[in-house]
Every structure is written in structure tokens, then in C-alpha cells.
Amino acid sequence: MVQPDTPYIETVGDAIHWIYASYNRAKPLLAAGRPDRYIRHPEWTSRLLEAMNRPDLGRYNVAVTGSKGKGSHAILLAGILQQLGFRVGLFTGPHLVDFLERCRVNGQTISESQFVRYVQRVARAAAAFTLMEGQYFGPVGLLAVAAAMWFQDANTDVNVYELGRGALHDDVNRIVHQGAVLTPVFLEHVRELGPRLEDVAAEKAGVLTKDTLWLCSHSQSNVVREAVSQRAASTIDVRYLGEDFGQVHALHSCLLEVVYPEATYQVRLPSAAGFFLENALVAFDAARKVWQAKRPGVRMPTEIDLSTLRLPGRLEVLSEHPLTVVDGTIHAASARYLRRWIEEQKNARRCKVCAIVSVPADKDGRGVLGELAGVVDSVIVTQAHNPHLTFDHALYECAKNMVDDVEWQPYVEEALASAQTKIGDADMLVMAGTQSFVGDVLRQYQTETTSLWMRNPVGSVDR
């Protein structure tokens, strides 16, 4: 048995250390390579929520899961809801620059003093429990409980929770949620979720609980649809993009017109979101479901302006001269969006393109390079500063077989210095890779991340 200690928490650093302490204590006892269903214990998150008098109840919550684009869906959904007049809590992960990015109300991060105070309260409650050897409080679950308490005190109308790699055995899934969003699902995290697509689909479909009333989903494979069908009660309204919603009347620049039986809606998207059209459509349909639940009988506004909404690290423009973007991408499926963006910009500008790529060894670096190889002139392969990620030279060797001008640099600092020798102010610099690498890039550019709404946007990019 393990009795958690009553911790000393006075600073943000103390709070973060405590959030991971239970897992770090249990980690040596966990069987390496065993799936989540054997080693994760989200029931402890449920017990903590009960101990805190269920701060998630009385709120309207939406859970977001899937294999690709969870963060962008969550941010787009929260942004739309805020523009509809709701007070919106947003829980995402991982963070890019500042740990507090994971918890926001109306796009603004939680303050340091609030964060410490809520973690202190969760820690006091956790100290009353005795865990079996090898069990632990999931870090993301502890943080989700603290976020739920903050959202309750902040009197939010709607909260959007991004889940981790799964759903069925994910701590955040224990937050009671009336709505769910399912992003594209494919075979991933096979060690943690299972070796077959059927296993992954079953884990993701776990987002449907006894409290869930509706699901807005991308078009999915038959395997994923079967998992959803098996999980969904007859009372759940399951909606698929391209079948139940998503009729686009017009899309020019970043103005999206979406047709529903009751009205045609205009959504002005952030510049990069034009390349995440399907994500925006799914987020909008989910927002419409929330509106119908929260404002029954009231006509929903037909114009929504998201033009100043930031999607941090998702085709984010950092500089105009040279045109510099950073994009979180670790597999071919997401790199295709980036390739399309590069193609359009390169055709319009007639410029050279240098790409800095940083994909860990256990991700699809070959797929990312395969998408970018035909549209970039040079590639610099590098690694992130995160010591928990593994990088090797296999990606560099792979790049040499795809692009003529390739080199290896240790970290983003050296890679940026080298890139400056390859391109001029009229050219393009594209940085693509894992979230930790994106965070390294944003720190280099001193990007402000406390708000999701741009105060001084970088100059617009022609689309």
C-alpha cells in the first residue's frame, strides 16, 4: 500500500513536481510495454472528483479524442463557443512553452497563484487515499480535477477537455461530458492502445459514456465506425462529417459558409485554419450542438469571427521576412496539410524553402519527409531539448535519400543559424516536428502563449 504524503506546495514548480510524483513513484513497478488497460487507473481520478464534490457536474462539458488534430479541434471549438457568447473553459495538453497553457478560460491561461491554490486543494484530498503498489494518480487526471474546480469557480458555461492518447482508460475521460468530438482515428500508440486498429478504435470510442448525448466525428473507417456503433447507446446522436453535416456552400480566402437546414452560417477562420477545413467543420457542428442544448429555441448567430484566434504551433506564422512557420507534425497524415500550404506559398512567391524537421525515432519521420521532400529545397534534421524523447540519425540518413541539400544540427538554435545561410528574406522557413520541438521554436521566437487571441497579429499571409 502507498499512502501519499501531504505535500509542500508553494510555487508552480512545487505544484508541477507533485502532479508527477505519484506516477514517478509507481513507474519502476510498472511492466514495460503493457497496454494502458493494465497499468492505468483512471478510477482514482473519479474518486478525487467525488472527494472534491464533483466540480464537473453542473457544467456542460465536451471531450475531444482521436488520433490527429485533437488540440486544433479543441481550440477551434472553444473559440467558436466564446464568439457565440459563452464563457468557456479549455483543457489541453501537452503545453508548448508554459505548463499553465493547459488550463484556460476564454483563451487566457490560469494565473500562477490560482494554479498553486487548486493543486494544493487536490493534493490535500489525494493524501487521504491509500493506493495499491504499482498504482498511481495519473498526472493528467490530477490536473483535470484542478481545472474542473477552477472552471466551476470561474462560472464557465461550457468546458472543452482534450483527452490524451486514448479515451476508455484515459483519466480525463472521467470528467462527465455531455458532448464528444472524434478526430480522425488511425493505428497509433500500438504499445499502449493495442496492436490492431480495432484495439485503437475501441479505446477512442470509450469517449462515449453513459452521460454522453452526442458525438460529432470526422469521416471514419468501417473499423472505427463499428467500434463507435458498439459503444454508442441508442440515445446518442452520432454525426459524421460529410454525411450528417458539413455541406460547404462557399470557401474563399478564410471565409467559410456552412449550410444547415435552418440557416447558412459564415465563419471567418484564422489564416492557417483554411487548411484545417474539416477540423473547423467538425468543431462548428459540435458548437451548434452545444448551442441547441444551452439555448433551446434561440436562433444561433449566423456570423462568427475567428480571424484573430491562434492555433499555437499549428501552421503558425512567426515572421514575414523570411516567411517563417512552425507546425506540430509527426506523421504523414498531418504533414499533408503542411505540404499543401508550402505548395501554395511557393507557387505564389517563387521562393526557396528550407525545412527544419524534428521527429522522434518512434514517430513517422519518414512519412513527414516523404510529404515534404518534393516541395522543399533543403532540410535540416535536428532534435528537441526534451530528454524524454529519443532521436537518432536514421531520420537524417532517410532525408539524404530524398533531398539533395540535407544536414544534421544538434538543436533548434544551431538549425536556425544554419537555415539563415540557405535562404533570404524573400524565401520561406518551415519548422515541423514534435510538440517539444515546437515549444523550443516558440521559445526562440519569444512567442507569447498566455492568450489564444492575437493582440498584434503577424501580417496576414495570402491564401
Image: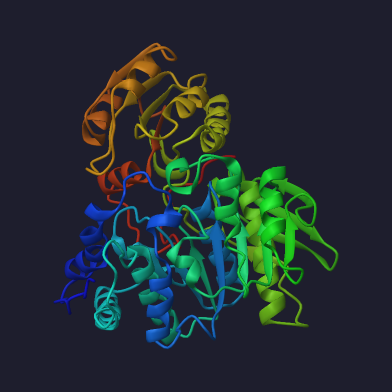
- Residue 137, given in percent of the width and then of the height, sits at 32, 68
Looking at the image, what colour scheme do you see? rainbow
Query: Is residue 372 depicted above or below 50 in this figure?
Result: above
The structure residue drawn at horizontal position 40% and vertical position 79%, both measured from the top left corner, is 47
Whether residue 91 is visible to the viewer of this picture, yes or no, is no
Is 333 situated left or right of 102 in this image? right
Name the residue: 47% across, 60% down: 169
Occupied quadrant, residue 281: bottom right
Q: Quadrant of residue 80?
A: bottom right
**Residue 440 on image: x %, y %:** 28, 44
Q: Is residue 177 visible?
A: yes
Q: Nearer the viewer, residue 49 or 353?
A: 49
**At 62% across and 75% down in the image, what residue appears?**
211
Front residue of 388/431: it is 388
Residue 277: x %, y % from top left: 64, 47
Left or right: where 424 falls relative to 243: left
Quarter of the picture holding the C terminus: top right
Instruction: Tell me how many marks there are.
Output: 0
Q: Classify the position of the N terminus by image quarter.
A: bottom left
Residue positioned 18% across, 66% down in the render: 13
| Quarter of the rendering containing residue 462 | top right
Compared with 402, 161 (above or below) is below
Q: Is 82 rendered above or below residue 367?
A: below
